[in-house]
Each structure stands twice: as C-alpha cells, then as structure tokens.
Image (cartoon, rainbow, N blue to C red):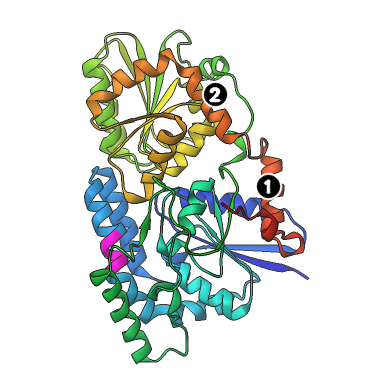
Amino acid sequence: MTQKILILYENVGSGHKRVADILETILSEVEDVQVVSYAASELFNDSTIQLVNRLWTMFLRRNWIRLTDGFINFFLRIWVAPIVEALETGNYLDKLEGIDPDILICTYDAFGKVLGTYAQEKDIPYFLVITDHSIFSDLVNPHATHLCYFPETINAVRSFDMQTTYFAQQIDRDSSTWDKLKYVIQMYRDHALFRSRHTIFRNIDRVHREQNMAKAIAVGPIVEPAYYGKQNQREMRDKHNIDIDTSCLLVVSGSIGGSFISDMVHTFQQQVTEPLTILAVCGRDQKSFETVCGMQERKSQVKVIPLGFVDYLHELYVAADAVVARPSAGVLLESLMCRTPLITTELATANDLGGIELIKGHQLGEVYRRSEEVPGLFRRMMTQRQRYIDNIDRLLASYPASFADFAGQMREIILPASRRVAGWCQML
C-alpha cells in the first residue's frame, strides 16, 4: 500500500524549501512512497503569508534587522497569528483533508498548531523540522516529533509549558465562535499580562528548565549531498581561478543578498593592505550584484569577484579560508560541513540567534559587533585556522559522515514501516 507523505515549506529565503527538497529526494526513492510538497501559502491560498515573505526579504536586503525581528518575528506572532488561527483553522484542515496524507512533515513555522490538530485527528505521524537552532512556540507541538540539528534545540523544545493557552486550547472544525474568541482573548492575556512566563521564543544561550517530554531527535545538518566528503582547497581554487597563495574570503547572505555584502566588501577595502581575494555572492539580488561590480577596482590589493546566484556554492566554501555571513542556519551548516570557519554578526533576528550561540559555545568561528572589527578577526583567524576546523570536526563527529548514511537515518525515523522514534529521541 502506497504511503502519501505531505511536506510543507515556504518560499522565504531558501532554507525552508531547500530542506523540504532534500527530504523529498530521500523519501521519494523508497518504493510505495508518494511524496507531495507545497508552499504553505499556496496550499492554503493565504495571501497574508505571501505578504510577510515579501516584507521579510525586503527588510533583510536593507539590513533592517530590528524591524524584521520586532514586526515579523514578534508582533505578527503575538497579535495577528491568534486571529488567523481562529478564523482559518477550519479552512486549513479542509485543505489537508483534500490531500489525505499518511505522514505530515513541515519545515516552516506558523503552522505547527493546525498541523498538530490534523495529525491528532487522523492519528498519523507528524514531523516538525526545525530549520533554525533557536525556536518559537509555533515550532513546538505535543503531537509532533521534532527534528533538530543539534541537542541544544531539543532542550529549547522541551522548555515550553504545554499547559498554556497556545498548546492546551484546541481550535478545530467544531469550535464555536465563542471558543475562537475565547482563544484569542486568552492568548492576548498570556502575552500582555504574563509575558515573562509565556514567552514565545527560546534561544539556546542557556540550559532551560524542562517542562514537557516532547519527542525530539538531533539528526545533524540537513544539507545537499555535495556538502558531504572532503574536497581539496587547491583543486577548488584552480577550478575557479583563485590564487592559491592569497588569502580568500567568502562573503554571502543566502539568496537574499542585500547591503550586507557591499558593506562588508567596503570595510575590507578600507582596512586591508595585504593581498586578499573576496568572493562576494549576492544571490538573487541583482541590485546588490551591480553594486559590488562597481566596487571591483577600488583597491588593487583586494580582488573582488562578484557573483550572483550560483549552484556551486559548496565549492566556494572549500576554496575560501573563511566565511563572513549573517548567522542563518543554512550558511552555518554549509560552512561547518565544508570545515570553513564562519565570522558572523551579533546583530541578528531572533531565529538566527541560536547560530551565534553555537559558534560561541563550540568555538566554531568568531562573532563581531561592528563591521569594522571583521578584518582584524579574519587576520587572527588565519593564524589559528586549524583550531576552528578541529572544533568543527568534534561537533560533527556524532552525525552521519556520508549522505547515504544520513538518508538511511531519515528514512528510518520518518517511515512508519521502520520507525524507531522512541529509540532515536534524545533524553537530555
């Protein structure tokens, strides 16, 4: 009998969809398994999510970190999401009913509650894939198995009080108007009056008090096959015409691009006197690419190579001595898998703060407060680069060393015929 697996992601940045695509590839190779995947905004025909996605991209391209965080990560979650849940849950459940999946997988936030309601109603397996390291409450559900990258996130998952309104009060097809109104009122009460007790966010900067026994598994980095296996830096530099005897820095900001890249290139051009090659990957942001192109000839010692969206980013990680980037989970995981130390900023949206804590806690790279500090950090990193690589090796030693092994692990966790979730769950 064919098992139908539904994977939900979202078209914001590239991390959610990329992880969904990797899981779809892994699971589709199994006989008698049908995988269907949708962007949640398209499946639910929700224009609100599409607007939020556009705002997220626009804000980050302009480096408006605090506005992005305050408005999207917190204001919308606290004051708008409860209303949407009350009004749209029935419609969302009907859409899921039309697909009739045997297994639910979600790589995006915002839908944890409604998917948990459907999974409980149908008594089917439900997996929430946490694509960041720190988390919000909508990425935790008592009916889900939480797939995390590292154990620190498991501790964050288990720190939420499942007796609070968000987790304890269910909204479904049979909920009356009064039930929905009561839910919204109680959510507002929790956030307005008991904010310190009912915070929606957990960073991994501390060991939190455990308040639930949610199923959670640390599976290691979820990245494409190209990031597995050792590659030779000299070969990658020869392939991309990069001088092997000159220090090389990769500056990247995911597919969003934005002013972060041009600002960092400018900082190095202002401060660096020794020869340096900068690979400036601007993603799909044409304006950022054109700006960096105009900076190429400003300083002869600093060779700037502007690049748009590339499908060989893993090769550039290997070619580089270090990476400068925002602390997004995707960039951090990719740099770790390529054993390339990362320099990142403390100014980050809440969902990216966990990456900063991992870097600090495991000494995987360096964190800066002001962009003017970065050239000095890069010079210091080059004098002890092997120490960072050794720390990365220690962090990754517990996880699959090949994509084939990783794929086998994920099939064993997800597919009911071979599920051993209880044995996989890490008890911290």
Q: Main secondary structure of the magenta part?
A: helix
Magenta-colored stretch includes residue 41: no
Q: SS at mark 2?
A: helix
Q: Is residue 51 visible?
A: yes
Q: Residue at x 24, y 56 (%)?
A: 70
- Label 2: few (<14), some or many (≥20) within 10 Å? few
Q: How many marks?
A: 2
Kind of residue indicated by mark 1 = Ala
Q: Is residue 28 visible?
A: no
In the picture of the structure, the residue carrying the numbered disc 2 is 390
Q: Residue at x 45, y 20 (%)?
A: 321
Say above or below: 163 vs 153. below
Quadrant housing the N terminus: bottom right
- Label 1: few (<14), some or many (≥20) within 10 Å? many
Kind of residue indicated by mark 2 = Asp
Alpha carbon of mark 2 to alpha carbon of mark 1: how far? 25 Å
> Range of the magenta residues?
74-78
Q: Tag on residue 407?
A: 1
